[in-house]
Image (tube, grey):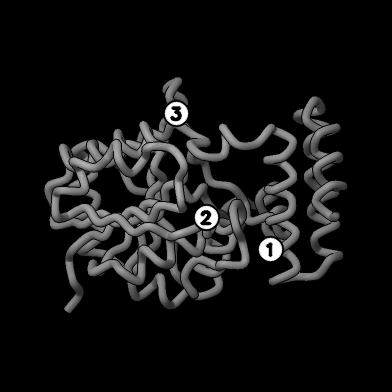
Amino acid sequence: KMNKKISIIIVNYNTKDFLYNCLKSIQENITVDYEVIVVDNCSSDESVSKCGEIFSDGRFILINAGSNLGFAKANNIGAERAKGGIFHFLNPDTTLDKSMNEDYRKVVLNNDLLYVNPLINRDGSYENDKMPLPLIKDLFFWNFNRKKSRYWYKGASVIISKDNFNLIGKWCEDYFLYAEDLDLFYMAWKKGVRIAMLNSVIYHFGGGSSSTKWSDLEREVMVQRSNRLFYRKHFSNTHFLLVKLYFLLHNLLKRPSVVPQYLKAWKLSGK
């Protein structure tokens, strides 16, 4: 019989106010049986001290990673400590409301899927659209027969049973940041774990820890470097180049202004 507790796992790195608001929203709105595990990647701001009073609530557990282990590895450490049968991997720059309780109950009753949430940005715009897996076959179907294309979502809120999490091989620790969510969804497709969108909206404030640390170009280089790793792991260099050319053409047609930076980052990411 599956443990019905929800383990909410949050990786934090210097997101003080975001983290506080996120934990407070859980404490005030979530009524199902839950625990929250915060893995702190050696933050240098007052993230931990600001949330001190929340950590005195026994349902909130703090793990100090000791150094900045990156997103995937820190999530896996949180998952190892988790006691629940359902894991909710949640970014610290989010807040939950009461409607999440209904979704948690739904997930407990139907726990064989991987779930994501609609994300709403601070300006009220909707963020979490389906994206095709960046593979030749799926990009082809995305353009000509969308129902047949496999897809993925941003990893800001991912809910999965402990059993399925172990089945798909956890978060891949080869990635420090970026593309680990792409890898997770790709592995879910490979292992036959279906993906579904829940109803409750999660408010997402975006780029909590990366926006303060890197310029746009530096971030784009990181993204491209992680993407290279994804193809090296699962596919060939030729596949990687063909997909890159596809996106280059796509950007030239749809968003020409981003092309110079895209090319510069592509070049730098190969170094």
Mark 2 and mark 1: span between their CA atoms? 21 Å
On screen, residue 160 versus residue 41, left or right, reads left
Nearer to the camera, 121 or 34: 34
Location of residue 78 with respect to 15 vertically, above or below: below
Give the residue number, with chain letter if any, for mark 2: 68
Q: Which one is closest to the eye, mark 2 or mark 3?
A: 2
Q: Position of residue 51 (x, y in %)?
A: 27, 40
Nearer to the camera, 213 or 169: 213
Q: Secondary structure at mark 3?
A: loop
- Give the mark, 3 or 1, whose residue is nearer the N terminus: 3
Give the residue number, with chain letter if any, for mark 3: 121
Nearer to the camera, 38 or 202: 38
Q: Position of residue 262 (x, y in %)?
A: 80, 38
Location of residue 123 with respect to 158 vertically, above or below: above
Farthest-out residue, top: 123
- Give the mark, 2 or 1, whose residue is nearer the N terminus: 2
Q: Residue at x 62, y 67 (%)?
A: 174
Q: Amino acid at mark 3?
A: Asn
Q: Secondary structure at mark 1?
A: helix
Question: Image quarter for residue 167?
Answer: bottom left
State yes or no: discs 2 and 3 in contact (Cβ < 8 Å): no
Mark 2 and mark 3: span between their CA atoms? 27 Å
Q: Amino acid at mark 1?
A: Phe
Q: Position of residue 186 (x, y in %)?
A: 57, 64
Image disc number at residue 230: 1
Q: Residue at x 43, y 66 (%)?
A: 76
